[in-house]
Structures are given as structure tokens and as C-alpha cells.
Image (tube, rainbow, N blue to C red):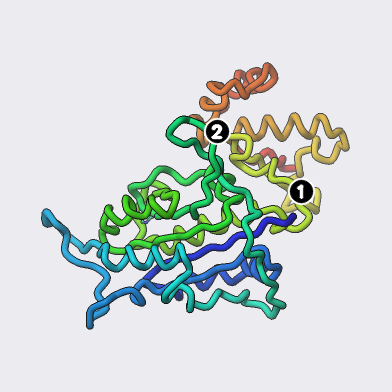
Amino acid sequence: MIGAMRIDVVTIFPEYLDPLRHALLGRAIERGILEVGVHNLRDWAYDVHKAVDDTPFGGGPGMVMKPEVWGPALDDVAALTGPAAADTLLDSASPHVRSGLRAGKDAAQETTQDAAGEPQDDDRPVLIVPTPAGRPFTQELAQQWASAERLVFACGRYEGIDQRVFTDAEQRYRVEEVSLGDYVLIGGEVAVLVIAEAVVRLIPGVLGNRASHEEDSFQDGLLEGPSYTKPRVWRALEVPEVLTSGNHAKVDRWRRDQSLHRTLSVRPELVEAQEAAGQLDKKDRATLRDLDKAVTWTDPAQKR
Ligand code: ADE
């Protein structure tokens, strides 16, 4: 069957998540492959000022988001109760026919191990917390999460969210703190857009006829090589001849070599990881030996 997923996002800036309704994700919503609920954290604020943050224990700059607001918000989003039950689901940005998602539990579930090391199905939703203090978000995580039934994103602002919120949330969620990279954004909202797109495009049926993602960068641990389309010569730059030769084996080898070259040039640690994992064969190693003298990758298109 076609995969189906529900994504919920808790944020103090619900309008930031509007891009989820467009393009690929909007189409997935239209086709009933995806449901998206966006929730305003302030709906769970309880004082007259609707405060969601407070000063940090131990001093220091900035504000920390309050556990008494986040706790109930995440409880309600897990159970789809309280304000979370009333929140409307995002519609696609284009006119469409809404189709219902299945309510049952036929989506793939993560298999984890219990205390005795025995595999068990874990059907807790994944709670994804974008934070520069998290482990790196990778294609491998995107692949894992693409088969989850529910993803819930918690968007922090200011100096972050009281850590006890996530310790407590472990009872209802598989909690994952992830970082997009070694830089600091103002909040998690933009990271949610990035992660959601990386995950949703991997749900079977979302990319239409494209049968597999085998040629994506990172899918084989290396970066993808260059691509070209018509015309064969553009501004005196000629597409590499091998691509117009019709020899598929040669094309495949050339693409693999380009991939190795580009990766060695800009992300040498990825090539090392492939070597360590035993993923490079004799031909790959021969290519890498030849490349040693010319580490900088440049567009192989030729000036005529
Ligand atoms: N929030 C703030 N900075 C971030 C980063 N680098 N990755 C993910 N979430 C963030």
C-alpha cells in the first residue's frame, strides 16, 4: 500500500510552517498520503500573559521555554486531545479533494529491543526536536522516519526548552534531538521544514513514478555526480561524450567515478567511511589512486 503519515508541529509561530502546504508536501496532503497538524504552543499557556518562557536557573543570557507549557502540549498532541484535537489540519495550497487517512496501525513500526534484547514493536510517535545540540540529521534518519506512522516536531526558541520536558516525553514518544549542522538558527521552525521535506519525499508514492532513491546523494554514502540535459553543446560547453555513447556500463562506471571524485574533493571523510565499511571495490580504489593527484573536482563538461 501507499505509505501514510501524520506530522504534527508545535510552535509559537504557526505561520512559519505554511510552506508545508506547498509543492511536494502539499501534493502528498492532497493525495491523502500525509496529514499535517500545526499547533500554537500558546494554546497551552496558562497565565494572563500567555508566557511560554522564563529565566534560566543558574543565570545566563536568554530565556528557557517552560515545562508546564510544553508538557501538557506534548501530552495532548500525542493523544490528539484538548486544543490538539480541535486544531485544523493544514490543507494543500492548491485546490484538491481531501481524502481520509487510515486510522489503523498498518504503517511500518520501528522495531526496537526491549530490556532483554528481544525485538519489540515501538509504536510511540517519534518526537523530533531540532536543536544545534542534537546529533546530526542524516539521510539514514530520514529513511528510518519515512516509515513511521506519526512524527511530532517540537520547535524551541530562545535558549531552548527545559530538558525535563524530553526526559518526561520518553514515556509517550521516541525522542530524537537532531541538528541540521554546525550553525545556530533562531528557532526550530526552518529545521522542521527541512527535515519534513527530506522525510516525506521518501514515503512510497510521494515522488510519483520514481521507483527508487538509489541515485540520491548519500544513499550510497557518496555525493551524486554532475547531471546534464539537452542541448549537447551550450555556451561552447560540451556534455561529457560518454553520456551520449549509449554504453550503459560505461555510463555507470563514469558516474561512479565522478561521484568518488566529487566526494573526495569536498567531503573526503565520506570516502574514508565507505572504505572503512568495505563498500569500495578494486575499480573504486583504482579511481581514487588516479584522483590523488587531482583532488579538486571541476565540471567535466569540455569547451569546444
Ligand atoms: N535550531 C537552532 N539551530 C539549529 C540547528 N543548527 N539545527 C537544528 N535546529 C536548530
Q: Is residue 74 above or below residue 239?
A: below
Give coordinates of residue 114: x percent, y percent: 47, 36
Instruction: Determine whether, in the image, residue 124 is placed left or right of residue 208.
Output: left
Mark 2: is the Cβ under 8 angstroms from ligand 1?
no
Task: Identify the residue shown where x is 48% and y is 78%.
Answer: 86
Mark 1 neighbour class, 10 Å CA radius: few under 14, some 14 to 19, many 20 or more? few
Mark 1: is the Cβ under 8 angstroms from ligand 1?
no
Residue that carries the numbered disc 2 in the rendered image? 296
Give coordinates of residue 78: x percent, y percent: 45, 62
* Quadrant position of ligand 1: bottom left
Instruction: Determine whether, in the image, residue 114 is placed left or right of residue 64.
Output: right
Q: Secondary structure at mark 2?
A: loop
Instruction: Determine whether, in the image, residue 258 is placed left or right of residue 184.
Output: right
**What is the spatial separation of the Cα atoms under label 2 and label 1, in whole angstroms?**
33 Å
Looking at numbered disc 2 in the image, what kind of residue is underneath it? Thr
Kindly give the residue lying farthest to the left in the view shown: 59
Residue that carries the numbered disc 1 in the rendered image? 211
Give coordinates of residue 304: x percent, y percent: 76, 42
**Residue placed most toward the observer, 111 or 33:** 111
Looking at numbered disc 1 in the image, what kind of residue is underneath it? Ala
Task: Identify the residue shown where x is 45% and y is 58%.
Answer: 191
Q: Nearer the viewer, mark 2 or mark 1?
A: 1
Disc ID at residue 266: none
Query: Tag count in the figure?
Result: 2
Q: Is residue 118 above or below residue 57?
A: above
Q: Secondary structure at mark 1?
A: loop
Task: Identify the residue shown where x is 68% and y is 56%.
Answer: 3
Task: Identify the residue shown where x is 67% and y is 63%.
Answer: 33
Mark 2 neighbour class, 10 Å CA radius: few under 14, some 14 to 19, many 20 or more? few
The image quarter containing residue 75 is bottom left
